[in-house]
Image (cartoon, rainbow, N blue to C red):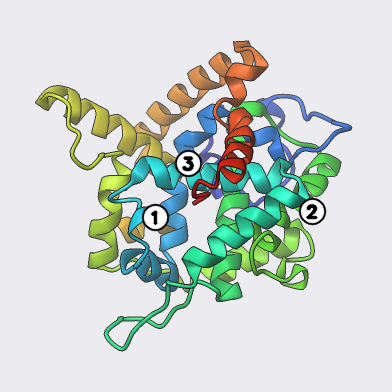
Amino acid sequence: MSISGGHVERPVSGPPLARAGRPRRRTGPTLDEGLLGVALLLGPANVIMQLARPGVGYGVLESRVESGRIDRHPIKRARTTFTYLAVAGRGSDEQKAAFRRAVNRAHAQVYSTEESPVAYRAFDPDLQLWVAACLYKGGVDAHRTFVGEMDDETADRHYAQSMSLGTTLQVPPQMWPRDRAAFDAYWQDQLATIHIDDAVREYLYPIAVSRLRGLALPGPLQRWHEGLALLITTGFLPQRFRDEMRLPWDDRRQRRFDRLMAALRTAVHLSPGPVRRFPFNVLLKDLDWRIRTGRPLV
């Protein structure tokens, strides 16, 4: 399946595409259905989308929480983010409460100063709604890419459950757009507010190419790795964000991306369930262990 822009340009309320696989009707919960290990490939693109809001971008760029900086501690930050997705999708009330307290302690240290180019604070529900919206959008793109299309009933249930991506923190339920059509309207409105300046772009580019601080492969392998990572990251970005990042895209790149995603989709469908869901299927157990032993959760 290949269409201009791929799934990333499609509205979440759009009808399922017949060519992407027959729509699937499910009777169980669906929020965690997209929590597949291969969905981690969307991580860099989702970070870029989140930080494209200047308040979020500078909140991360200027963060006083040293241990949570993705540029300095990418593995730890990734664990925190993926644990949050697992908690929001499958966590118990106790797990959500514990994780919320830990995140709140970190967020209390994130606020702008007189020297900051933009005003922000991590407890701003508008900025938190944007982050939750990016996570939901990424979840839909992952599901459409690696699992298949959802029928309207399943998509509506998935959307209602995804409210927890915001309400697990400080987003009041009434701020979550009432349905998928309202979400699409919200998303389009928010695109007018995004801007990535030179400082944030410089911060984000190593993330876009999955460049780990202090770790480099031999020259040709590093260039191949970064080229492949950049293809995947850019492929999962809507064009508005590609433009802000100044990342080129064309039909040839789209075809390469589509072929790669088709191969990965086949591999996902052939893999056993526990393999498909790793590491999400162990993160809640890791969270419980951290709570029991008094270790940091974020």
- Pick whichever of labels 2 and 1 is earlier in the sequence: 1
Residue at x-position 64% and y-position 52%: 11
Q: Is residue 125 at all visible to an observer of this figure? A: yes
Crowding at dot 2, Cα within 10 Å, few <14 / some 14-19 / many 20+, comes out as: some
Three-letter amino acid code at the position of disc 3: Arg
Name the secondary structure under disc 1.
Answer: helix
Q: Which of 236 and 89 is in front in this view?
A: 89
287 left or right, relative to 225: right
- Pick whichever of labels 3 and 2 is earlier in the sequence: 3
- Spot the residue most to the front: 293
- Pick whichever of labels 1 and 3 is earlier in the sequence: 1
Q: At which x and y percent is residue 60? A: 38, 64
Q: Which mark is residue 68?
A: 1
Q: At which x and y percent is residue 146? A: 59, 28
Residue at x-position 72% and y-position 71%: 172
Three-letter amino acid code at the position of disc 1: Gly
Q: Which mark is residue 207?
A: none
Q: Residue 160 carries which label?
A: 2
Q: Nearer the viewer, residue 189 or 82?
A: 82
Q: Residue 67's image quarter?
A: bottom left
Disc 2 to disc 1, C-alpha distance: 29 Å
- Spot the residue most to the right: 27
Three-letter amino acid code at the position of disc 2: Ala
Q: How many labels does the image show?
A: 3
Residue at x-position 39% and y-position 35%: 232
Name the secondary structure under disc 3.
Answer: helix
Q: At which x and y percent is residue 276? A: 60, 21
User: Are circles 2 and 1 on residues that touch, CB within 8 Å?
Assistant: no
280 left or right, relative to 163: left
